[in-house]
Amino acid sequence: MSHNLQFYIDGAWVDPVVPNTFDVIDPSNEDAFAQISLGSKADVDKAVAAAKRAFSTFGFTDVGERLELLNRIIAVYKKRSADLALAVSREMGAPRQFALDSQVGVGLAHLQKMADVLKSFEFRHVKGNHLVVKEPIGVVGLITPWNWPLNQITCKVGPALAAGCTMVLKPSEIAPLDAIIFAEILDEAGVPKGVFNLVNGDGPGVGQALSSHPDIDMMSFTGSTRAGILVAKAAADTVKRVHQELGGKSANILFPDVDLANAVTKGVGGCFGNSGQSCNAPTRMFVPRDRHDEAAGYAKAAAEKFTVGPADAAGTRLGPVVSQVQFDKIQDLIQSGIDEGATLVAGGPGRPAELNRGYYIRPTVFADVTHDMRIAREEIFGPVLAIMPYDSVDEVIDTANDTVYGLASYIQAKDMKKAREVAARMRTGNVYINYPTWDAGLPFGGYKQSGNGREYAEYGLEDFLEIKGIAGYEAAE
């Protein structure tokens, strides 16, 4: 039985208080292939009430009990991996194998990492004659995006469960089906009723109701900076904690000593991964001015190797972007690059010639980009790379940091001393030196308008905990 038109509240699949169906679009062909229900404040109230009841017991469970629960979830998640991958592929356009290996795989990695963290995490420590304890913050509202849906769901649900919190999840209404399957996974794994609740909906209908709800103790939001501001404003009246992971415009600084062909090719791959729909994508590539044209040539060659096509087509490396809204935004920004005088090296406006339906973007590279251009300053969220020449180390650091965002930055250099010195000067939550392997144990989050708080491993767990000092405890343990 499909639960697409229902919500998961208090351990059961329930119908919405007020029916309100919404089409889920396959971005590969623009067809509606499923429907969900959009919730309302009434549904949120039911879910929050269930979570509040559940917290009175789950908030005081033993760590071992929560660890067993996480391990059961991991086992069922593995069993449902193919279902999750198909859902993600159809709802947001990820190529089938990428959906399984990366989109689903990253969620599993986060759950496994959280289970490992929980085995040894110290929830209490003695300080003189006193005791300091870390306790679950309470009932949390979770809002997740469409671009890496399972990454963000597991980054929030995993640590919330590990901490002892209860929760209400609102996934993106654009890519909601994987979250419904995830709720089925938690149900099968035996999550106690009311601990995890799922209400589908949009920002005005469900996001606003969650953010402003007096019985929600914390909001954890991932999405655009614009929407994150709305969440923070809605939460302000109840003085709840707000954790935000927002947009980015990440710089990729290539130093003169690198193998330029290799560094540029990998940089293009990093920018175009997931069809460019990653908040930490290295979208601004800074290269020495005297090697700018050479770098542009390597980028053109790399971009032209990306096969664009439907998510289910063999050989597709670059699927569609998620929606008409995103397609139109990206097209506007590509045109702005041309209008403002950047050199179009590869791609450009419109769909690839062989594709007349679906939200497909031509893999696009601009060279001779200046710092004042829109493509250098605005988050594009598509497969569009801006190559920017620089003359000195101080200049490139200043320009790279001159942005409202501060999520990630990338440095390519053989001289590790120089790379480390530059990393220390970057105003970003993450710095990646020489394209390292992704690590679920490294903290993830941003400076400035890229958000606050951190996710992944123990850093994510800490964000779901309150700190209590018990003076005069005289604990000997």
Image (cartoon, grey):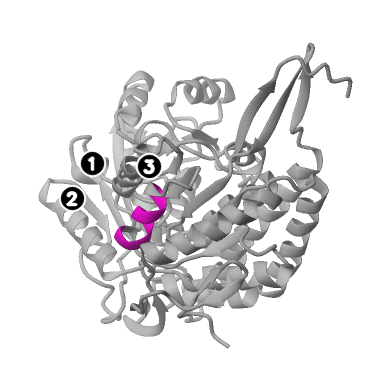
- How much space separates mark 3 and mark 1, taking CA atoms? 39 Å
Residues in magenta, as a range: 204-211
Where's the C terminus, which quadrant?
top right
Point out residue 233 in the picture as x, y percentages from the top left corner. Answer: 31, 41
Q: Cα distance, mark 2 to mark 3?
A: 37 Å
Neighbours of disc 3 within 10 Å: few (<14), some (14-19), many (20+): many
On the image, the x and y values in percent for residue 88 come to 50, 71
Residue, disc 1: 369
C-alpha span from label 2 to label 1: 8 Å
Which SS class for mark 3?
Answer: helix
Q: Is residue 278 above or below residue 395?
A: below
Marks 2/1 in contact by CB < 8 Å: the verdict is yes
Task: List the residue tagged with mark 3.
Answer: 235
As for residue 95 lying within the magenta part, the answer is: no
Disc 2 target residue: 337
Q: Quadrant of the N terminus?
A: bottom right
Q: Amino acid at mark 2?
A: Gly
Question: Which of pointers 3 and 1 lies earlier in the amino acid sequence?
Answer: 3
Q: Amino acid at mark 3?
A: Ala
Q: Earlier in the sequence, mark 2 or mark 3?
A: 3
